[in-house]
Image: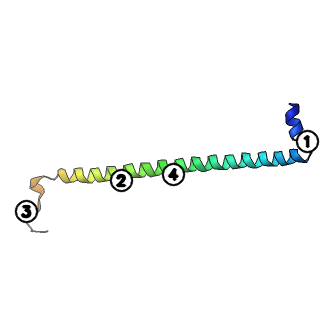
Amino acid sequence: MSTILALFSGSNGIIAGIATLIAAIGAAYLKGRSAERTKQKAKEKDAYERHLKDIADAADARNHVQPSDSVQNDKYRRD
């Protein structure tokens, strides 16, 4: 305990205290930045999965068309 007090006594102690404070603020900033980046990646992953599901649903809908529903049976001959 006396060693810690000796570090913070005098002008060198003030410099050490300021350096410790700056290091703590920097570490908190980097941790918050990393957490935000992880959160953004999760959002992008969810959006990509929804996009792939939409594509799969569209392809699946194409496979459910009945032959009786085709344009060839349209009495008005619409394209």
Mark found first going from the N terminus, 3 or 4? 4
Q: Which sits in the foreground, 78 or 36? A: 36
Residue that carries the numbered disc 4 in the rendered image = 40
Mark found first going from the N terminus, 4 or 1? 1
Relative to 72, is 23 on the left or the right? right
The numbered mark at residue 9 is 1
In three-dimensional space, the C-alpha distance between marks 2 and 3, rounded to whole angstroms, equals 33 Å
Mark found first going from the N terminus, 1 or 2? 1
Q: Quadrant where the N terminus lies?
A: top right
Q: Residue at x 53, y 47 (%)?
A: 38
Disc 2, SS: helix
Residue 20: x and y in percent read 77, 45
Q: Residue at x 27, y 50 (%)?
A: 57
The numbered mark at residue 51 is 2
Q: Which sits in the foreground, 63 or 69? A: 63
Mark found first going from the N terminus, 2 or 3? 2
Residue that carries the numbered disc 3 in the rendered image = 72
